[in-house]
Image: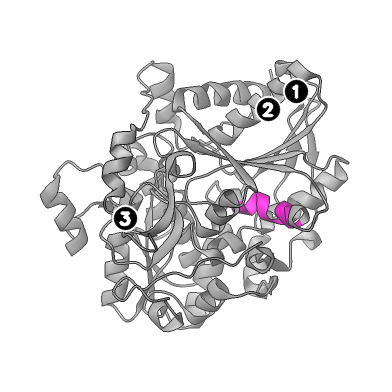
Amino acid sequence: MVDQKQKKFLLSENDIPKQWYNISADLPTPLSPPLHPGTLEPAGPADLAPLFPTELIMQEVSQDRWIDIPDPVREMYRMWRPTPLIRATGLEKALGTPAKIFYKYEGVSPVGSHKPNTAVAQAYYNSIEGTKRIVTETGAGQWGSALSYACQQFGLEAKVYMVKASYDQKPYRKSMMQTFGGTVTASPSDETEAGRSILAEDPNSPGSLGIAISEAVEIAAQNDDTKYSLGSVLNHVLMHQTVIGQEAILQMEMADAYPDVVIGCAGGGSNLAGISFPFIADKLAGKTNTRFIAVEPEASPSLTKGEFAYDFGDAIGTTPLFKMHTLGHTFVPNPIHAGGLRYHGMAPLVSALFDAGVYEAKAYHQNACFEAAVLFASTEGIIPAPEPTHALKAAIDEALEAKETGEEKNILFHLCGHGHLDLSAYDNYFSGDMVDYALPSEAIAEAMKSVPQIGK
């Protein structure tokens, strides 16, 4: 039964942030620069120009702490922002914990996740620079849906390469993308040289985000009217998501409960950054002692088991190399239901903060996460997407620890999307057919052989 005393903390449209927060200005040490894939020299704006519009390239390398949100972008944000922050009193009661549990809910957006926060911005900047088509990849489909929606709003075409495992598992994500005018292809495909090379090696490849990125980048590089767009990992993408944490700071003030711990699931890093970066600014300034937890799947544990090294962002090796926690760009994860977390690398910004000890990291199996999701749905009335079930599981563990110690701490986690189009995953869980994949060290070692030996 849903607890009717559930508390929501709501802001007005006037509270939608007017600027994005750029944590690059506050890092303890600067990021290592991306490297050109051919020369291995630091990549400059000219190297990124075939893929991205100028303004996004400037944001990628900016050291300005605050960057203004254009009025057309902020106006579109008003369709779903500010998003609610909710105290999970029903879940607290079920757990019998003295902790207060809060969640920031991004499932109210047009596509049911946090992804439009950057998709709208990227589509806008492309539109004003004359781009006709944007090509991208997507895992579970949330990002492809968001970009298809955003492109439709600004009169652009959207071409999406969707990881085949998710393409097969989540057919209604494809339907959503098509509803918003997007064209969707299962990856690996025979449309690109990259896809054909993968299929030649493994005709039954389940695909990966790295492979889909290779296909999308190839298309963008070959067409002057086409740009590439990424839904996570890059600095400007994470920055666009900070509207989430900025709102959450105001809402936690309304609740008179500054968080002792902030938790987000971690695949490429965008939703984790969105909820945590604005709070991390306070910690870096010495104002708080909040803990920050990145939660990933055991099947794709780039932070907990990967290596901090320069690696390609795609499977073929055509993108710049980034200093990040990686499992190796040739790594193909098992087809878990949290398709948005099946990436071989972690955002350079998140990786650097993890290496500096700002983030903690945990990894869970998907059965334990879905068990947490069912409890949450029964007490809070929202069915989570598979990705944020990882953050939810960590939040429950924190609350149970507080129950044992009697600590009255404030827990904030990011519920970055609903699971209404992921019910086949819940069917799989209830039938007992859901498989937990533990990534063996041998598989990591094999994939890491593909990582260039830079600075070693």
Q: Residues within 10 Å of mark 3 (few under 14, many from 20)?
A: many
Q: Is residue 205 above or below residue 12?
A: above
Report the residue at 65% width, 26% height from top: 396
Q: Main secondary structure of the magenta part?
A: helix
Residue for badge 2: 398
For the residues bearing labels 1 and 2, Cβ distance under 8 angstroms: yes
Q: Magenta stretch containing residue 32, yes or no?
A: no
Q: Residues within 10 Å of mark 2 (few under 14, many from 20)?
A: some
Q: Secondary structure at mark 1?
A: helix
Q: Amino acid at mark 1?
A: Ala
Report the residue at 49% width, 81% height from top: 54
Q: Amino acid at mark 3?
A: Val
> From this viewpoint, is residue 2 visible?
no
> From this viewpoint, is residue 58 visible?
yes
- How many dots with numbers? 3
Of residues 83 and 325, the one nearer the viewer is 325
Q: Write the start and end of the magenta stretch as one range.
A: 273-281
- Residue 447 place in picture, x, y as percent: 28, 46
Of residues 386 and 300, the one nearer the viewer is 300
Q: Residues within 10 Å of mark 1 (few under 14, many from 20)?
A: some
Q: Say which mark, if any, is on residue 451.
A: 3
- Residue 384 place in picture, x, y as percent: 56, 34
- In the displayed structure image, the side of residue 340 where residue 358 appears, left or right: right
Quarter of the image where one finds residue 252: top right
Q: Say which mark, if any, is on residue 259.
A: none
Question: What's the distance in space between the residues labelled 3 and 1, CA to CA?
Answer: 41 Å
Report the residue at 51% width, 59% height from top: 348
Q: Amino acid at mark 2?
A: Glu
Report the residue at 81% width, 48% height from top: 288
Q: Is residue 41 above or below residue 205?
A: below
For the residues bearing labels 2 and 3, Cβ distance under 8 angstroms: no
